[in-house]
Image (cartoon, grey):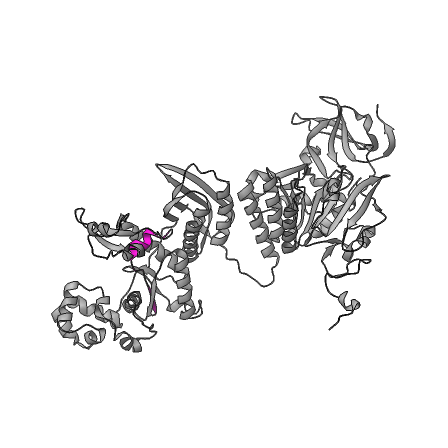
Amino acid sequence: MLWIALELPALPLQVAQRAGASREPLVISEGPEQRPIVVCANEAAQSTGVREGQAVAAAKALAINLRVLARDPAVEREALERLAAWGGQFTPMSCVDGQGISLEIEATLKLFSGHARLSSAIRTGIRDLGFQATLGIAPTPLAARLFARAEANGLQVRGCLDLATLRERMAELPLFLLDWPGKTLAHLTDLGVVRMRDMLDLPAEGVSRRFGPEIAIYLGRLMGTIADPRVPYSPPPRFRARLELPAEADGVDALLFPLRRMLVEMEGTLRGRGAGVQQLVLWLEHGRKLRTRMDLEFATPERESDFILSIAREKLGRLALPAATIALDLRADALLSYVARESTWLPGAKEQAIGRERLVQRLCARLGRDRIFGIVIGDDHRPERQGGSHAIFDRGRDNAGTRDSAGKLPCLAPGRPVWLLNRPRKLVNQDNFCLIAGPERIESGWWDGTEVRRDYYLAANARGETFWIFREHRGEQGWYMHGVFA
Amino acid sequence: MKASVAQLAQLPGVWRGGELEHAAQPVVSTGHAILDRELPGGGWPTGTLTEVLHDAAGIGEVSFLAGALARASAGDRLIAWISPPHLPYAPALAAAGISLDRCLVVRPANRDDSLWAAEQALRSGACGAVLFWLPSDEYAWLRRLQMAAEAGRAMAVLFRSTAAQRLSTPAHLRVVLSREEGALEVRIPKRRGPPLDCPIRLQVGRSLPLASASTTNIRPRALVAVG
């Protein structure tokens, strides 16, 4: 077994600042309402002398315009769970653990070509999500957590890949990194036991007798002598993420950065599940129950954040927002199975098809679906029904229908114009035209009430422009122009 | 280190003023041998912006490219029609051998969207040919489209009125069309080579050139005035 532990120091602050760091002093408070205590303070607050453990009242005296947010353990827990779901792309064994997540990576080491590559991929990924995390790697989850905490406290430690060297690697680490009860730690300090080496040198029965069996069991799990099974986190079958912006965002550009973080998180989560999304709803919250809905739909399940962001950018650019945005809420209620696309050096037919789909989706996102068409041959002799358009977006990958119509090619009459007018234009004075070819009688449609009986001619005017005109013998009789031989 | 003129002429993008460029630019044959002869590389260029100038509608300004379009769509790539004046009529395209399920008609609401759509289509690399009817005369935008065409290696054809003749263009090829004596007259005021002095005439327009079906049911009745 090999574990990677991610530790998120100052988690409450990180959760509050994820959509962008605040330059104003900001602290997270906890404790009774009468006397709240500072749990975390951002850099701006620390530079004014605010420290963790201070009373909020004292901190307010130090920093003018101090923003105080109450700690919300539920939000922190949710953030960690989503992080664990994101970690599912690296290994199926991903779980929430303390102030971070633990991943068991031995089984997937080969897939990610070694622990060095894997841990650098995880570090980059975490940064893209907008979190800061320290990383520890060890054969047991507790030891990995210990290393991650040591790094968070600024201690230089090297990861450990096998049990034999574990004891030696952790020998110099201070005991306070372990999340043991304060009383136990104080007791040990009184005994002069402050480093891991001293602790591990104590006889096991003595430890169990003096500090309780749970400490002995903890040590056993830490050193890998006692099994430490974990339950992998299983995310719900949908994706939801909400992000509050650090300041009111007026334009759309300011939303793209936080949106990207959410989409990156979604991509990781979807990767872990082998899933993609076809429909996404993004709510832009403006405060006072005012919000704007934006729908994103794709022809096939998608999950690549860059692609989704490019579509969202076009859509957002078209939105007229009623007010400044204060939060983003992204929801995907149906996760569909995703067909992985392998990339190749030489793009072939499959890549072409993807390129086509993406182009159509991008155009639809900005222009609207009713402005993109494909063209088809209708099964009718009336020209206005024989040539037609259809919405291309809903067709997806299935274009068998149009193939059928292409099969009817041989029975087409010749001499058809490139442009067909939307509706025939009545000719006031047909003397300007000379008829070149025709007539071709088209008589059809008696069954549906729009019967036509027309004689079609090719006609040219003095400038040499050639048109397709007809003489209608039913209904409103007369001469009409129907096409242009462009 | 002095390179001789003959050596210089071997460089890509360098050609003598009196000759056509012979560089290995990918081209698509138009199906008209007489026109292909006058085009550098022996066909309609791809990967660069080209302009077709015409004033009259219905002289065969689209159909003279039908052969090239049919070939451009052959590689499973799209043919994008951006803001065409009318809907392309499916039976005519099918008769010309253009694959219908590769055709994409885009009708944006305004000028900016048209330009954007043209640029996206060109840049995507998914299009074998992009035909656009744009109201813009801005050189900067044409230059952008030229860059996009280079990136996407598509056949990019801009249809404009002949009033644009006096404006300069970043396009590598400019063709002016008119109808003379029942034939399509093609002049080439700009190409990579000397301008074409005497215009060439193509027989197109009545039916698309690749149409293979017979014309038995149409009897020509020349010059009959209808009263």
The image quadrant of residue A219 is bottom left
**In the rendered view, does A332 fall on the left or right side of A53?**
right
Per the rendered image, the range of residues in magenta is: A1-18
Measured as percent of width and height from the top left, residue A276 is found at 46, 52
Q: Is residue A453 above or below residue B121?
A: above
Identify the residue at horizontal 43%, vertical 68% (top origin): A117
The quarter of the rendered structure image containing the C terminus of chain A is: top right
Measured as percent of width and height from the top left, residue A154 is found at 30, 67
Q: How many marks?
A: 0
Frontmost residue, A173 versus A26: A26
**In the rendered view, does A34 fall on the left or right side of B39?**
left
The reply to whether residue A88 is visible in this rendering is no
The image quadrant of residue A91 is bottom left
Frontmost residue, A447 versus B140: B140
Q: Is residue A309 above or below residue A167?
A: above
Frontmost residue, A396 versus B77: B77
Measured as percent of width and height from the top left, residue A353 is found at 59, 53
Q: In the current view of this chain or complex, which residue is farthest to the top?
A: A476
**In the rendered view, does A26 fall on the left or right side of A260?**
left
The reply to whether residue B35 is visible in this rendering is yes
The quarter of the rendered structure image containing the N terminus of chain A is: bottom left
Measured as percent of width and height from the top left, residue B102 is found at 65, 47
Identify the residue at horizontal 65%, vertical 27% (top origin): A448
Residue A10, magenta (yes or no) = yes
Residue B72, magenta (yes or no) = no
